[in-house]
Image (cartoon, rainbow, N blue to C red):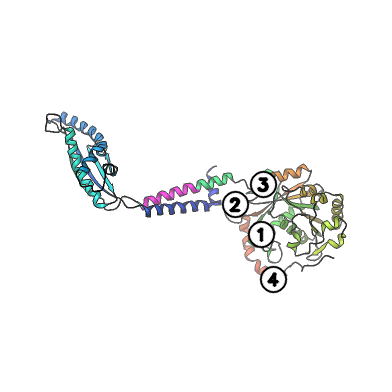
Amino acid sequence: MDLRDYLRAIRRRWWLVVGSVVLALAASTLVTVLTPPRYEASVQFFVSAQTKGGVTDAYQGDLFSQQRVASYVDLLTSDRLADMIVANGQTTGLTAGQVQARISARAVPNTVLLHASVTDGDRARALSLARDLALQFAALVQTLETPSGSTVPSVRVEVVAGPRLAAAPVAPTPARNLGLALVLGLLVGVGLAALREAMDTTVKDPASLAEHVDAPVLSTVPFDSRARKSPLIVADTTRSTRAEALRQLRTNLQFVNVDRPVRTIVVTSAGPNEGKSTTACNLAIVFAEAGKRVVLVDADLRRPRLADYLNLEGAVGLTNVLVGQARLEVALQPWSGDKVYVLPSGSIPPNPSELLGSRHMTELLRRLEERFDAVIIDTPPLLPVTDAAVLASTVDGVVLVSRCSKTTLSQAKQAATALKAVGARLLGCVLNMTPTRGADAYSYYEYSRPEQRSRKAASAAAPATRPPERVSAR
């Protein structure tokens, strides 16, 4: 992934970054609040070697003192010094190990200065320990550095600063904790967003869909929050960007092959809930807008939807015609005038695939093609069942509907492979429910928004088209 991929992942999944930062800051705040304050008292020592005088001796003494300072860092945290401090009797309630754990030391580089600090949860005890440390450390060095038979130590340690207590607690440090939490939250959030992006194989754009199915994308239909309650492009939705995208689909289908016009079209998808049934309904509506006489056939004999969408009675329909229980003229129901006719699914049969692949179904399609300019057929999804593949080989072409950010690229490819396996003609794809905002939005949505803002005024001036009342099949 390059930088643009990371930025796109962050824009698509910004909630992961924000959530990680919020959780990290919340955890840091909780830790900061629950951590008891700790106070620090410090003292600084000056280490000098005893010399007789002279420049050479002073120089050698300075080097000797620097070497001793490095050793005294460990001496300050030694067991012996801790025992001496405890034996002094000023550290009530602390053992030698606890005193040793509270002491830290460091040498100031290239100097003979030694810095020691004592950290404790009690301010007074921290200062008291630092004072005992200053006294006992000087005494210990004097004992260790005094040669046998002499009363003068070869190295002398003097306190040059402190002991003094810091004005504010050294722990916890809210600013540092929150800063580290912010950085950690950002890193984790960006990492999660990038990982999710790398693992996401769903269809995101027309180019990747067209590449995997080896067919053109005829239209990208934008997501419309009103489509759940009003899936059909009638009344005030006829001027929406969704309606324009479906008109684009109609136009592209008309120009797929001017020498061999497409009249019978199967609309299907790889899996369920991708919008194939609403696409089939709306495709019939936009064909009727162009002056075509259209018949919409519900060949989804497992979960029929068209009768509900169009507010029609679906008890008598395709299956009844195929088995000879009803005549085609009786089963066909007009919708919105005489431009659109609907053939509902009828009774749900136990053998949908056999019915759709029968000779009677082929003959029925030929009869419909003679009477209508366009035959739009809604079928079940391709991957769960074979109904659509069986029917696809007998029509002029197939439109494959894929839902943005839901259908995976492998599912779309498998669906296209299933169609090619039966010799079906895949006209192209429809990328459904594409986002209108965010990283995956398309620029023409922005161009269309002024029209959306004015659709209320336009719909008030134009006569509204409403679906007819429910009618009963005879």
Q: Which mark is residue 461?
A: 4
Q: Nearer the viewer, mark 3 or mark 1?
A: 3
Image side of residue 175 versus residue 57, left or right: right
Q: Kindly indicate the quadrant of the structure image that contains residue 245.
A: bottom right
Which three-letter amino acid code belongs to the residue tagged 4?
Ala
Q: Give the distance between the C-alpha atoms of the residues marked 2 and 4, in whole angstroms.
A: 34 Å
Element type where label 1 sits in the image: helix
Q: Answer with mark 3 or mark 1, whichever residue precedes in sequence.
A: 3
Real-space CA distance between mark 3 and mark 1, rounded to the nearest whole angstrom: 21 Å
Q: Which residues are magenta?
A: 174-189
Percent from the top left, x then y, of residue 258?
80, 50
Image coords of residue 468 (percent x, y) = 77, 68
> Mark 2 and 4 residues: CB-CB less than 8 Å, in contact?
no
| Residue visible at 86% across and 63% down in the picture | 330
Crowdedness of circle 2 by 10 Å Cα count: few (<14), some, many (20+)? Answer: some
> Can you identify the residue that label 1 sits on?
241
- From mark 2 to mark 1, how far is it between C-alphas? 16 Å
